Amino acid sequence: MGGMSTERDISFKSGNAVYNALMEEGYNAVSIDVGRDVYNKIIKEKVDIAFIALHGKYGEDGAIQGLLEIMGIPYTGSGILASAVSIDKVLTKRLFMLNKIPTPSFRVMKKGEAIKSANALLEGLRASFVVKPNSQGSTIGVSIIDNKRQIKKAVTKALKYDDTILIEEFIKGREVTVGILNGKALPVIEVMPKGGIYDFKAKYTKGMTEYVVPARLSDRLNKQLADNALKAFTVLGCSGAARVDIMLDSKNRPYVLEVNTVPGMTGLSLLPKAAAAAGIGFSAMVEEILLSAIDRVKVWGTA
C-alpha cells in the first residue's frame, strides 16, 4: 500500500481496509508502505503472499508484480503484462477497437507538440471531449471541455502527470461500472455524482455521489454490460479482481472506458459495493481475492 504515486493517500485507505479485514479473518498480515526499499521490507517480513492494494505508478503498471515474480512471491490481481497494458489508456482503447469492444473515439497528443496541433486533432470529434493523462487513475489531471478555447488549459493540466495525453469524445449519459471478481461479473452499479461529474472530489467525499446497485437497467442491458466488461477483462489478460468503467449514451448504447486492475477498497469504493450487492461481505471478498493468488503457485509449479 501507499507507494510513490499521486494516489498514495487513497492507496493507504485501501490498504488499511484490506489489512484490517485480513486480521479479522485470522491471517498473519503485515502492511508494507512501498518505497525504494520495498525489496528489503518484503524480505524482512518474510512475506508468503502479497495482497496488492497499491494504486497508480509502480502498483498498477506491472512494476511491483515483476519484483514479486522475481522473488517467487504469489500476488493478487493481474499479472505484469495485463497490468502494464491496462494502465495505458491509449493501448487499452486500441485493443478494444481491435476486438470490437465499443469505446469512445479518441486522439493522442504527445508532450512537445504545439497546442495548435491539438485543435487539429479535434477535427471529427463531437463538441465535448475529455482530456486525460494516459497513465493516471482517480480522475487525476482530467478535464471535460466543451469548446476548443479550453484545450490549452486542459492539455497543460494533463501534461503535469504524463507525457502522453488522451483526448476522448465525451459520452453524455449514465455512468456505470462493472466489478469483476475472479472471472465473474458482479451486479452493475450506476454512479450518479451530485455535481454532474465523477471527479476526485465526487469519488472520495462522502455524500457527493449516489450509487445505485443493482443499477436500474433492463435484464438485456445488464447482460450486455456484463458481457462487455468480461470481454474487456479477458482481452487485456486480467485476473483476480478488477473494475470496468462504462458510459451509456442517451440511447443506452455502452462505451467501455477502461479497466482498473487494482480497484479501490475504501469505504466509498465501487468493487466492495458490488460484492455486497452479490451477498459477499468485505472480509469475504478480500479473502477470495487473496486466495486467488494461490493459482499463480500452481502455474509457477515450484515457486
Image (tube, grey):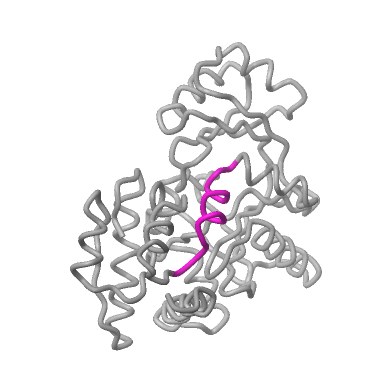
- The answer to whether residue 53 is above or below residue 277 is above
**Is 128 one of the magenta-colored residues?**
no
**Can you name the residue that lies furthest to the left here?**
44
Residue 198, image x and y in percent? 51, 48
Residue 108 pos. (x, y %)? 62, 29
Which quadrant does the C terminus fall into?
A: bottom left
Task: Using the image, determine if residue 10 lies above or below residue 158.
Answer: below
Foreground: 230 or 270?
Answer: 230
Residue displayed at 29% across by 55% down: 2
Foreground residue, 162 or 282? 162
Instruction: Identify the residue shown where x is 24% and y is 49%.
Output: 36
Is residue 277 shown left or right of residue 263? Answer: right
- The stretch of residues the image draws in magenta is 76-89
- Point out residue 244 in the picture as x, y percentages from the top left corner: 60, 58
Q: Is residue 161 above or below residue 152?
A: below
Q: Quadrant of the N terminus?
A: bottom left
